[in-house]
Image: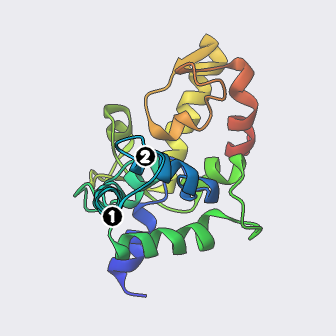
Amino acid sequence: MGKKVVTLLLAVVFGGVLSLPALAGPTSAERLKHADKNKDGTVDAKERHQEKVWEHKQGSKVNTWWENRADTDNDGKVDSNELSVWRTLEKERIDLNNDGVISAKEKRLCWRHARSRVNTDLEAKYDTNSDGWLEPSEAQELLKDRYTIIKSQGQAKVDSLLEEEYDANNDGLIDSGELEELKQDLGL
């Protein structure tokens, strides 16, 4: 693989991971209900055409968190190349035990395997080479410092996508009750 492909693969790792159920989309019954604009219980040719146009527009937009990660050129769409790279990345670098399911731990540990785009002021402080990316070692330093803060103060505000993976109750804080997974992932 060329450097660009590897860089692209590594760029989409952070913050979370695609799960197969998220790809499932609406059922055929939901599609029919949505397509039946005049609510007469049938979908005529005009409604079918309108639905196809709507689905195409929706399918080309970035609608979910994983699509946001996969959209590496930030154009608001996940093109076929980005989707292909994301799927490869998911298979080779995220699903570490190759069981086809991304566990919470595998999702959390993505920072160990690849660099991630700097998105917040906190992350920028740890981007020691100022290249706009957190290398695994830089991410580890950020997490170690957050661990120290939580140990001494009882909690820390979630200020990065990396930290969100450790906020089990999604309250915007990592507290001492959520600290054990962070400790294990850091090998402390």
**Residue depicted at 45% across the width and 76% down the height:** 84
Quadrant location, the C terminus:
top right
Q: Which residue is mark 1?
A: 45
Q: Is any part of residue 138 visible from this angle?
A: no
Measured from the top left, where is residue 88 in percent x and y? Answer: 53, 75
| Crowd band around label 1 with a 10 angstrom C-alpha radius: few (<14), some (14–19), many (20+) | few
| Distance between mark 2 and mark 1 Cα atoms | 14 Å
Q: Amino acid at mark 1?
A: Ala
For label 1, the SS is: helix
Q: Is any part of residue 110 visible from this angle?
A: yes
> Relative to 13, is 46 on the left or the right?
left
Q: Amino acid at mark 2?
A: His
Q: Which residue is mark 2?
A: 34
| Crowd band around label 2 with a 10 angstrom C-alpha radius: few (<14), some (14–19), many (20+) | some
**Residue depicted at 68% across the width and 57% down the height:** 102
Q: Earlier in the sequence, mark 2 or mark 1?
A: 2
